[in-house]
Amino acid sequence: MIRDITLGQYYPGNSVIHRLDARTKIIATLLYIVVLFMVKNFWGFLIAAAFMFAIIEFSRVPVRFIFRGLTAVFLIIAFTFVINLFMVDGRVLWEWKFLSITYEGVSRAFFMAVRLVLLIIGSSLMTLTTKPIELTDGLEKLLKPFSKIGLPSHEIALMMTIALRFIPTLMEETDKIIKAQQARGADFESGNLLYRAKALIPILIPLFINSFRIAQDLALAMEARCYHGGSGRTRMNEIKFHRGDVIAALLMAVFTGIIVLSRSL
Amino acid sequence: MRIEARNLKYTYSPDMPGSATALDGVSFCVDGAGIVGIIGHTGSGKSTLLQHLNGLIAPTSGDIFIDGECITGGKRNLTDIRRKIGLVFQYPEYQLFEESVAADVAFGPKNLGVKSDEIEDRVRRAIEVVGLDYEDVKDKSPFELSGGMKRRAAIAGVIAMEPEVLMLDEPTAGLDPAAHRDILAMIKRMQREMEMIILFVSHNMADIAELSDRVIVMSEGKIAMDGTPREVFAERERLTEMGLSLPLAGKLGLEISERLKDFATEALSIDELAGDIERYIKG
């Protein structure tokens, strides 16, 4: 169950997409998200989805694997869909007591759901094809110019590295605690909502305590290796843009242009 | 009580590039009381095997039978399995969560639906079995106990479920020598008093040699050897190939017999070795 969450996971590979500079991928992903909100009609979503599938094809990450990540956020998507379905005013399609579905509601709900799905696939594709360490290196470089105005770019990047690095660790820890409590007869799958919420306590408390223990160990280990922040640090592997990044940037620009054009369709 | 595994196979994350076969055709049978030690290199599938026997993981293929009843196919009553088979995880103290030791130990029996007046009895018994003073610890927070005591409190949490089979995954890992000795003595005593089946995983060959009636050696998801400690530890080369070794006394015995021509020993414990040396010196 807990292993199905692919958001933030890395899928090892050596595709064109994997080899792109992390900065290119971060900017492209941000741009893609912005573009998703510029889409106004069905054609725009079709183009955005086609573009996304082309990237997935190039990245050689199995589609099945990406969609499994969606099941974890399915509830959020379903919730958005239902809320939009019933809450938008307009031409009434169907009515029952206080509930009504409007033509506008249907299209809005559909748009929102597609937008969310593409948004999640887009951002998970970035983490799937980029090693966490490259991702944060890229982020640090991108934020570097802002350090002049006091933005702690190195610290932010480090915090992200640690957060990303510990996602699998904490998931493993959670998995282990769930199993250990199941072995003691705990049941997380039946009963009403209140009962189920209460059933989480035996997982959350140990998880909380263990994360503090892990954090403490990590802090000590870093200090023992003389970590003192970002000033004066050099890198073994400096990241550089390549030809692929230029091509990717051009493609992104073309895509953005097409989406902007599609607004007037 | 009889546990039987038939051709168990299990693969972790089968659709990822890093998929790993943890179990690859494991078959064995444990029939009747006794202590079974399981050894193997890290990643040889020991812990995965224990989790299968407790119904926490369903095998990719193969079957497990508990007293002739299949627990792997179709509808299976997990609570029933866990009532019969207790599993103590590695570092079990990391799963403590209640406000008091007594409440934490009561968690398991409560989940099994044991009546509340019986729970108290069980909790008291379990805490005493693991060698803690019930009156002293029952109201203490589990987090203020020492490492060794926490471990015992956590083990008590499984014992209070009164399983017929107890499985322990590296019960002595990370403990100081005194706590280590106590836990071993506790396992031995429990087995004798309750005539239960105990399966335990350990990296400590001396513990395995001392406690086990039978040793199962796992390697790359398969059972590589299965026999009495003496049979298994007689095959030093094969063990070394699998990244394992002999208990200290065994190594020492071999070393001595290589240097002294007419000295022979099969000792696996310090006691036995000392006896053999004594006999040798006296002629």
Image: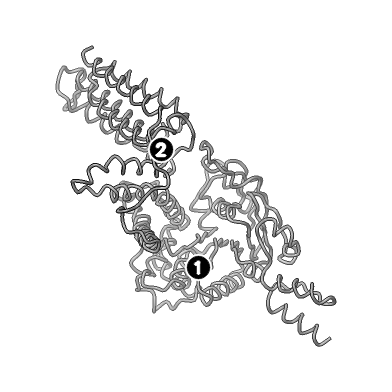
Across and down, in percent, residue B154 comes to 45, 66
Q: Give the secondary structure at mark 1.
A: loop
Label 1 is placed on what type of residue?
Gly
Across and down, in percent, residue A214 comes to 38, 59
Across and down, in percent, residue A149 comes to 18, 46
Would you call the spot at circle 1 few (<14 residues within 10 Å), some (14-19), or many (20 or more)? few
How many angstroms separate mark 1 from mark 2 (CA)? 36 Å
Task: Give the numbered dot on residue B174.
Answer: 1
Q: Evaluate if marks 1 and 2 touch, with contact meaning CB atoms under 8 Å apart.
A: no
Q: Seen from this angle, which residue lies furthest top? A: A265
Residue A219 left/right relative to B235 = left
Task: Same chain for labels 1 and 2? Say yes or no.
Answer: no
Residue A25 left/right relative to A35 = right
Quadrant containing the N terminus of chain B in the rendered view: bottom right
Label 2 is placed on what type of residue?
Thr
Q: Give the secondary structure at mark 2.
A: loop
Would you call the spot at circle 2 few (<14 residues within 10 Å), some (14-19), or many (20 or more)? many
Query: Quick one: B268 or A103, which is closer to the camera?
Result: B268
The chain ID associated with circle 2 is A
The chain ID associated with circle 1 is B
Residue at (81% x, 74% y) in the render: B264
Q: Seen from this angle, which residue lies furthest bottom? A: B282
Query: Quick one: B61 or B129, which is closer to the camera?
Result: B61
Residue at (24% x, 15% y) in the render: A261
Foreground mark, 1 or 2, reads 2
Q: Can you identify the residue that label 2 sits on?
A: A130
Residue A81 placement: quadrant? top left
Quadrant containing the C terminus of chain B in the rendered view: bottom right
Q: Is residue B164 above or below residue A155?
A: below
Across and down, in percent, residue A31 comes to 28, 29
Q: Is residue B116 above or below residue B4?
A: below
